[in-house]
């Protein structure tokens, strides 16, 4: 897009007038050519939303130019698609002649497009020939019954048939399977479907397939697997159809362990109580089983038909899921029991699916870089790229990975719960009633906000907090150190019970009937959280001698990545000031990685390789971290030169 | 055989800002002398490498009310002069003070709790009695600092006082006072390069030109963290010379206050005999602290003892002439 120079009326010879018609009101204004659409609207008494005060920052003053010529200033809030449809930002567009405008009503203003999480949108991140080498294979067999002339035993008879059909020489059969073998074959009249776990089987290889199911009749029309993301806060499951290779459905719920502590450290502490670890394990298994029941109901399937599970979770979640004591994860020198978990049977864990199904957990790098991150590196394609890539997953812990297909380095920093709404007076999770989007008017410091589900606000969620911090900063409600400027002429800035505060919503507007405020202490918590993340990024880059600016793409994963506004995150100095097109949201990279490893046989090996290849940088042992952290405890950063776009915005220079 | 040895020289891009304290009648004040510091283009006293246009200045600390917690060594040295700020000021100038650091301790709410107006009168009286520039400190209680320093700023408009301390938690009112009445400020941060830089940015964001900001990196006395101060000052100065604009402020060190706070300077009896003569110990402690910080880039030393003042004057002269 080429930037069109705005021609102001002073610059134009003569004093030409233009007529502006505002639909649907039918209001007409007679203005000079070169007038801003927003000014024209004001003259005509037409209300156009402008929460950012006409700075071109919010994109909420979109109007449709139905007829006539205007000059638009290029603005990231207006996509080229918008422009080609005739939309313009009223505060960034001037009139060049007679025009007809359509002002959308408030309800018509488009919400920021949410990341599509619907099942049909979840796709494998790259091509893999999973059909040629299925991990789980179902096969319908019609076996010749034994006779006095053919008295081979039942198991060998089954093997003989499989050798004939698949070239399989041997088969692993568990004792429980063996116990039911003879009866099942006969009751089914020797017409059975075998379910084979071919995960580690290679043609001509030495590892035989595992017999995990024997069903009467032809049951080959369905074959399912499960990809699970065990987050500290939420659990997400993908129901995977091994026949189509697609995600048939998804479901998610809070991890029931939340009742035993909100972060991994408190879970570890809880696990040390009497029966604590068992209790935590039962809770997460129950969470998953409930989700399985839900999926089975919605999709009219039998949970028994789920024949393999792939699980991604951080190291603590993986330990608890497997019933391993996580105690030493928390104690220096922070050593987990294992990083590459072995295959386990679903039945042993209590998962309500085919009890012989294999359960594989994604491998970890260390105590604080777990299977959720290796899973993210897998699904983001970071491990296959030539471009210098930074992968960030921010939650309570911020984990980041830098590298290319040749090398990977990773670190974890404790951001604290601020970005999830924790440690902030009116913070909350991103659920109904949370303020998720805020604009502050730079003239009168009045906020405009958007609430999830359009109900009365109950609090502010992580994305709302990032927005709010950025808005207060760029409009001067707070200074670069995060101190509220009490002298501002607005009642919203005041001394509250908990120190200086800014009132986001007055009691009359809120769900609880109390003011929703952000205090200076809240602001400090947020600044500390963003500083930890940015300092981690800086140290990670410095450790391998690259500059943040050299990073060619930044991939944002994790739940957080779905809602974060890159522009605002840069303004507060949470993310580096790089061109927006370098940032990519990937959604739930952890679950996607689990799905990828479930479906593509060689990706299971690839993720183990990724985990082994990643170098772990321990920030608590890095003496430059504190210096980087203090340097980042400022907005956007003590070194403003590292944030050129924010500098331009603050000092209004081009 | 004579051998010519080329001294290796570092080439720096940056320069410390030149800052002038005090204004003469021609400049809108009433001072008979002003103090300019800064302007260095090299590390301390490396005259062969760059320019050091101004000698480090000595500011002598005086208080508006007789100090209650000072070492007897100090009280004996100043004797009756310390009973009144005007006589104290005159005596300090006689002893060679380039500037005076006036601490308005009497305004402290838990001391005499003198009013802002009284404090302003004291400052006016000192300004009337001596011709050197003043650095004026409030009681170091945020609310009262603001009240007192704003009154002083107004009463001494145009004098180019340095008002202190601005800290990250409390700088806006003091900076506003300095802005409105033509003064300078002292920006104090707790021994950290980043924090020093951040406060300079915050102050500059309010519109106060950076040639009106002194930075106090916080002094650790000999034996009480001097190595931290030394290292942070050195890093600040290196950053300044490397061209980091927000670290190019001249540095002021409150050497007297910190070294006289310590047991070695204050306690006469019940200490090991190895500690030596009590009367000499305090001044020596102050000198050793001042000497080290001079070498790490101090532009203004705030001193307390007459002996230290004399020794440091001589030392600075020698260091500047070589």
Image (spheres, coloured by chain):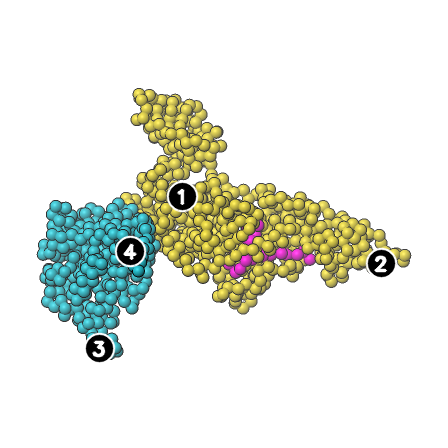
Q: For mark 4, what is the residue?
A: B43
| Proximity of marks 3 and 2: CB atoms separated by less than 8 Å | no
| Proximity of marks 4 and 1: CB atoms separated by less than 8 Å | no
Q: What colour do you see for chain A? A: yellow
Q: For mark 3, what is the residue?
A: B269
Q: What colour do you see for chain B? A: cyan
Query: For the residues marked 4 and 3, what is the alpha-carbon distance in whole angstroms?
Result: 41 Å
Would you call the spot at circle 2 few (<14 residues within 10 Å), some (14-19), or many (20 or more)? some
Mark 4 lies on a secondary structure that is loop
Image quadrant containing the N terminus of chain B: bottom left
Q: Taking the image as drawn, is residue A302 in sight?
A: no
Picture disc at residue A74 = none
Would you call the spot at circle 3 few (<14 residues within 10 Å), some (14-19), or many (20 or more)? few
What chain does mark 1 sit on?
A: A
Residue A121, compared with residue B260, is above or below; it is above
Part of the protein shown in magenta: A356-378
Query: For the residues marked 2 and 1, what is the alpha-carbon distance in whole angstroms?
Result: 75 Å
Residue nearest the viewer, comparing A244 with A306: A244
Q: For mark 2, what is the residue?
A: A152
Picture disc at residue A438 = 1
| Proximity of marks 4 and 3: CB atoms separated by less than 8 Å | no
Residue mark closest to the camera, 3 vs 1: 3
Q: Residue at x 44, y 41 (%)?
A: A579
Query: For the residues marked 3 and 2, what is the alpha-carbon distance in whole angstroms?
Result: 105 Å
Location of residue A222 in the rendering, given as x and y in whole percent from the top left corner: 70, 47
């Amino acid at each position: 897009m080429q930037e069109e120079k705005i021609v102001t009326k002073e610059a134009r010879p003569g004093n030409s007038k233009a007529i502006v018609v505002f639909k649907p009101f039918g209001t007409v204004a007679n203005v000079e050519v070169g007038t801003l659409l927003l000014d024209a609207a004001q003259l005509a008494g037409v209300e156009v939303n402008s929460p950012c005060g006409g700075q071109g920052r919010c994109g909420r003053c979109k109007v449709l130019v139905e007829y006539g010529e205007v000059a638009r200033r290029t603005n990231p809030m207006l996509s080229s698609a918008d422009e080609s449809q005739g939309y313009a930002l009223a505060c960034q567009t001037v009139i060049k002649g007679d025009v007809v405008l359509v002002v959308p009503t408030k309800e018509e203003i488009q919400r920021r497009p949410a990341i599509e999480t619907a099942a049909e949108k979840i796709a494998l991140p790259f091509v893999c020939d999973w059909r040629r080498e299925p991990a789980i294979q179902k096969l319908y067999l019609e076996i010749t019954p034994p006779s006095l002339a053919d008295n081979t035993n039942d198991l060998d008879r089954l093997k003989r048939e499989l050798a004939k059909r698949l070239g399989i020489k041997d088969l692993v059969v568990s004792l429980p399977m063996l116990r039911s073998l003879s009866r099942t074959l006969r009751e089914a009249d020797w017409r059975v479907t075998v379910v084979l776990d071919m995960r580690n089987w290679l043609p001509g290889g030495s590892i035989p397939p595992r017999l995990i199911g024997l069903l009467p009749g032809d049951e080959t029309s369905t074959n399912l697997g499960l990809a699970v993301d065990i987050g500290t806060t939420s659990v997400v499951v993908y129901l995977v159809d091994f026949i189509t290779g697609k995600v048939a459905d998804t479901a998610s719920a809070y991890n029931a362990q939340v009742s035993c502590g909100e972060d991994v450290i408190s879970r570890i502490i809880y696990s040390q109580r009497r029966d604590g670890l068992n209790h935590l394990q039962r809770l997460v298994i129950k969470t998953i089983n409930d989700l399985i029941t839900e999926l089975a109901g919605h999709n009219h399937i039998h949970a028994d038909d789920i024949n393999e599970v792939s699980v991604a979770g951080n190291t603590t979640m993986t330990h608890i899921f497997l019933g391993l004591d996580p105690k030493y994860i928390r104690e220096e020198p922070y050593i987990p029991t294992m990083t590459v978990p072995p295959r386990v049977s679903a039945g042993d864990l209590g998962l309500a699916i085919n009890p012989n199904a294999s359960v594989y957990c994604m491998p970890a790098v260390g105590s604080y870089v777990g299977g959720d991150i290796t899973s993210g590196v897998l699904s983001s394609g970071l491990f296959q790229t030539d471009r210098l890539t930074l992968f960030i997953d921010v939650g309570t812990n911020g984990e980041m990975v830098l590298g290319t297909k040749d090398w990977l380095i990773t670190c974890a920093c404790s951001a604290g719960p601020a970005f999830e709404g924790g440690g902030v007076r009116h913070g909350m999770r991103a659920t109904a009633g949370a303020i998720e989007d805020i604009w502050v008017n730079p003239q009168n410091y009045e906020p405009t906000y958007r609430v999830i589900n359009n109900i009365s606000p109950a609090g502010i969620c992580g994305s709302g907090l990032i927005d709010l911090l950025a808005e207060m900063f760029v409009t001067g409600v707070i200074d670069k150190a995060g101190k509220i400027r009490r002298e501002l002429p607005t009642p919203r800035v005041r001394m509250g019970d908990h120190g200086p505060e800014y009132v986001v919503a007055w009691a009359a507007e809120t769900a609880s009937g109390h003011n929703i405020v952000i205090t200076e202490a809240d602001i400090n918590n947020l600044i500390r959280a963003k500083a930890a993340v940015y300092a981690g990024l800086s140290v990670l880059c410095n450790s391998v001698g690259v500059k943040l600016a050299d990073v060619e793409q930044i991939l944002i994963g994790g739940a957080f990545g779905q809602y974060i506004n890159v522009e605002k995150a840069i303004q507060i100095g949470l993310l580096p000031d790089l061109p927006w097109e370098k940032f990519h949201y990937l959604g739930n990279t952890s679950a996607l990685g689990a799905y990828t490893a479930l479906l593509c046989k060689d990706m299971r090996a690839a993720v183990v390789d990724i985990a082994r290849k990643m170098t772990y940088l321990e920030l608590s042992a890095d003496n430059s971290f504190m210096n980087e952290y203090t340097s980042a405890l400022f907005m956007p950063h003590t070194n403003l030169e590292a944030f050129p776009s924010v500098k331009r915005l603050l000092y209004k220079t081009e | 055989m004579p051998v010519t040895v080329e001294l290796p020289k570092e080439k720096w891009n940056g320069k410390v800002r030149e800052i002038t304290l005090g204004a003469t009648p021609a400049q809108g004040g009433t001072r008979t002398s002003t103090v300019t510091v800064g302007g260095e283009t090299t590390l301390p006293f490396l005259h062969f490498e760059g320019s050091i246009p101004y000698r480090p200045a000595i500011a002598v600390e005086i208080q508006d009310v007789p100090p209650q917690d000072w070492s007897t060594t100090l009280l004996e040295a100043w004797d009756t002069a310390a009973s009144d700020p005007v006589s104290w000021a005159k005596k300090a100038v006689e002893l060679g003070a380039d500037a005076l650091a006036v601490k308005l301790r009497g305004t402290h709410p838990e001391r005499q709790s003198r009013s802002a107006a009284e404090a302003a009168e004291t400052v006016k009286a000192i300004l009337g009695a001596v011709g050197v520039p003043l650095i004026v400190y409030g009681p170091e209680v945020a609310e009262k600092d603001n009240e007192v320093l704003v009154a002083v700023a107004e009463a001494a408009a145009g004098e180019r006082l340095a008002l202190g301390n601005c800290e990250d938690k409390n700088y806006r009112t003091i900076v506003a006072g300095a802005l409105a009445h033509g003064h300078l400020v002292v920006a104090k941060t707790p021994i950290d390069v980043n924090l020093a830089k951040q406060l300079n940015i915050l102050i500059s964001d309010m519109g106060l030109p950076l040639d009106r900001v002194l930075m106090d990196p916080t002094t650790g006395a000999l034996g009480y963290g001097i190595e931290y101060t030394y290292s942070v000052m050195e890093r600040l100065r290196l950053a300044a010379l490397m061209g980091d604009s927000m670290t190019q402020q001249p540095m002021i060190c409150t050497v007297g206050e910190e070294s006289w706070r310590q047991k070695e300077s204050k306690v006469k009896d019940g200490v090991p005999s190895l500690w030596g003569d009590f009367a000499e110990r305090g001044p020596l402690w102050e000198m050793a602290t001042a000497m080290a910080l001079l070498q790490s880039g101090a532009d203004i030393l705030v001193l307390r003892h007459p002996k230290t003042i004399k020794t440091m004057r001589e030392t600075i002269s020698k260091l500047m002439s070589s």
